[in-house]
């Protein structure tokens, strides 16, 4: 298949730009294609473990692998490295597939699982045993760690390191059949207990687990270790360029050792890139699972989480995430990206596609005393000034309206251009109004404003040509839809929550504010879950996909209107 960046297409297709913007991995791939390595083939994959939902860091890995396959007319696989039944679930398998497709990557008919190859992995482990390159070990988990040594001290060989091959083959078969309790034996590769890389000090190939697998059921009582299965999955599938983040660089010598010592049908090679780190969040799946299981969030899809399912629920778009990943690029050194850059990408896309609508989050009532009682008129509103094809809609206007409480000050500073006693403002798409009277309750709280309007100012212009500085959004009281609105902020108050002490100590106590009686214009009561809009002057919002119901909508704030990243770039 070929994509929009296919270098075989003519220059006007964008090929010249694609070549100019190639990162170091794409340069390697291009050189391999030109030299005929792998027969000129390009075949990539994304190999998640189904022990949780994907997060924003995974999106970079997906888009690198998928993008390379597209650019060079190659193939892309989705493979689940499902070697640990203790933490893996079908829910995660299905969720990961949804997330990968949502980002825009497509594996066609090439969906695989490491569990597809369990028989082959088992046979290959026996090959290593017969060749004196693996053995069954009786050390406990604690003893294995003790014998492995330290970074500065070599490890000690297991007492079973020279166990006869026939004995190890027999024990491994009995392990497979479930004859021993967990922890009784492991299968280990025989490499080098004095190796500087501790991954090479007789690593485990198999451990006993009497646990059903979500795909293979109770067939197996031993399961391959991730490090043993991962590279062999690439070899079986004919992957040419195995891309992964830098933390797996230390694993590469081990992957290569397995490839060199097993009868694999193909020799892949691993290429590492800098992982995506974001401020104000954590990317460890273990820590994300802890947040979920200890109820610090409502689930993997809590809109404060960095998971793709959560970002989708919050209203982030796949287009924005692709733009974000493209902007940060592919590097060799780890760094941390400001969360505001991701928000910038979200705003940039939603600014182009999200309709502008009126929603009052903290309502204050306005009564237009000289407007006819019982009358309703429809005013025409532009849906999106950034989109010529977005068209217009009609919104009801009447005698009683809701405006934002913050848009009125009884005692206002000199440069407050919104509503105050005696001042005139423009109601968006409607009329000029002047505040004539302030109504308070017994506690002195302002509960209503009595205003008058200029009938000749409809649409924002007057016969005398006068102008006002303030423009307010509003919602008709008689037609308002009441909604719950959730205002989300960073889950962690610190930009680097893992830097000092327990990351949980940096949880932001104000990461969620719930507004229960927001007033929305009528059309906002019937939008499909997942629909994104811009609440004028309040930010970008999305209809919640879980809790929103027809007639009782729930809206999540996707992003504020303020673009701190863009402002920082201008200052720089």
Image (cartoon, helix red, strand yellow):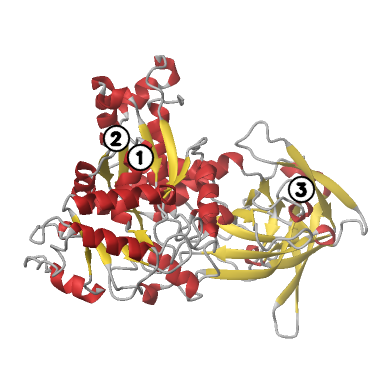
Q: Are marks 1 and 2 in contact (CB under 8 Å)?
A: yes
Q: Can residue 334 be seen in this view?
A: no
Locate residue 306 relative to residue 461 in the image: left or right. left
Regarding mark 3 in the picture, which secondary structure is present there? loop
Numbered label attached to residue 236: 1
Q: Nearer the viewer, residue 570 or 254?
A: 254
- Residue 452, labelled with which disc? none
Would you say residue 24 is visible in this rendering?
Answer: yes
Of mark 1 and mark 2, the one earlier in the sequence is: 1
Q: Quadrant of residue 181?
A: bottom left
Q: Name the residue under label 2.
A: 266
Residue 69 vertical placement versus 338 (above, below): above
> Residue at the spot x=53%, y=43% of the render?
101
Name the spot of residue 87 as percent of width and height, x first: 44, 65
- For disc 1, the neighbor class at 10 Å (few under 14, some 14 to 19, many from 20) is some
Secondary structure, mark 1, is: helix
Q: In this view, does 299 lie to the left or right of 261?
A: right
The first of marks 3 and 2 along the sequence is 2
Residue at 75 percent across and 81 percent down: it is 441
């Amino acid at each position: 298949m070929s994509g929009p960046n296919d270098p075989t297409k003519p220059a006007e297709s964008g090929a010249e730009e694609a070549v100019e913007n190639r990162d170091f991995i794409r340069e390697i791939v291009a050189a391999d294609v030109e030299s005929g390595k792998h027969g000129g083939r390009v075949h990539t994959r994304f190999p998640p473990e189904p022990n949780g939902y994907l997060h924003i860091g995974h999106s970079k890995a997906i888009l690198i692998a998928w993008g390379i396959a597209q650019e060079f007319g190659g193939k892309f696989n989705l493979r689940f490295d499902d070697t640990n039944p203790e933490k893996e679930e079908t829910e995660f398998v299905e969720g990961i597939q949804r997330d990968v497709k949502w980002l825009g990557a497509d594996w066609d008919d090439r969906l695989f699982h490491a569990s597809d190859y369990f028989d082959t992995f088992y046979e290959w482990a026996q090959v290593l045993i017969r060749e004196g390159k693996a053995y069954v070990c009786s050390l406990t988990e604690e003893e294995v760690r003790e014998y492995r040594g330290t970074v500065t001290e070599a490890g000690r060989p297991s007492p079973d390191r020279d166990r006869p091959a026939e004995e190890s083959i027999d024990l491994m078969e009995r392990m497979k059949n479930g004859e021993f309790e967990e922890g009784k034996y492991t299968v280990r590769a025989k490499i080098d207990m004095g190796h500087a890389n501790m991954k090479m000090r007789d690593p485990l190939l198999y451990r006993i687990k009497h646990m059903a697998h979500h795909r293979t059921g109770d067939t197996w009582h031993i399961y391959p270790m991730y490090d043993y299965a991962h590279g062999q999955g690439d070899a079986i599938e004919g992957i040419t360029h195995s891309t992964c983040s830098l933390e797996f660089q230390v694993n590469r010598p081990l992957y290569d050792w397995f490839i060199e010592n097993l009868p694999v049908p193909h020799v892949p090679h691993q290429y590492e890139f800098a992982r995506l780190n974001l401020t104000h969040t954590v990317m460890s799946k273990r820590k994300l699972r802890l947040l979920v299981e200890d109820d610090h969030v409502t689930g993997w899809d809590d809109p404060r989480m960095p998971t793709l399912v959560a970002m989708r629920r919050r209203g982030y778009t796949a287009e924005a995430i692709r733009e974000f990943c493209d902007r940060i690029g592919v590097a060799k050194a780890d760094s941390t990206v400001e969360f505001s850059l991701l928000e910038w990408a979200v705003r940039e896309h939603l600014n182009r596609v999200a309709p502008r609508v009126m929603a009052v989050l903290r309502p204050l009532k306005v009564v237009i005393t000289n407007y006819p009682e019982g009358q309703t008129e429809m005013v025409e509103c532009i849906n999106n000034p950034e989109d010529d094809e977005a068209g217009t809609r009609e919104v009801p206007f009447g005698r009683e309206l809701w405006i934002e409480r913050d848009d009125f000050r009884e005692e206002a500073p000199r440069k407050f251009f919104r509503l105050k006693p005696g001042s005139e403002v423009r109601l968006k798409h409607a009329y000029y109004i002047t505040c004539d009277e302030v109504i308070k309750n017994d506690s002195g709280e302002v509960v209503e404003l009595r205003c008058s309007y200029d009938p000749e100012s409809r649409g924002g212009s007057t016969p005398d040509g006068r102008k006002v500085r303030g423009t307010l959004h509003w919602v008709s009281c008689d037609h308002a839809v009441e909604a719950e609105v959730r205002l989300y902020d960073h889950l962690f108050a610190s930009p680097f929550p893992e830097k000092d002490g327990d990351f949980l100590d940096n949880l932001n106590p104000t990461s969620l504010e719930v507004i229960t009686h927001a007033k929305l214009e009528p059309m906002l009561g019937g939008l499909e879950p997942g629909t994104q809009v811009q609440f004028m002057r309040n930010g970008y919002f999305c209809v919640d996909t879980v809790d929103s119901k027809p007639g009782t909508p729930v809206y999540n704030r996707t992003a504020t209107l303020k673009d701190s990243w863009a402002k920082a770039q201008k200052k720089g």
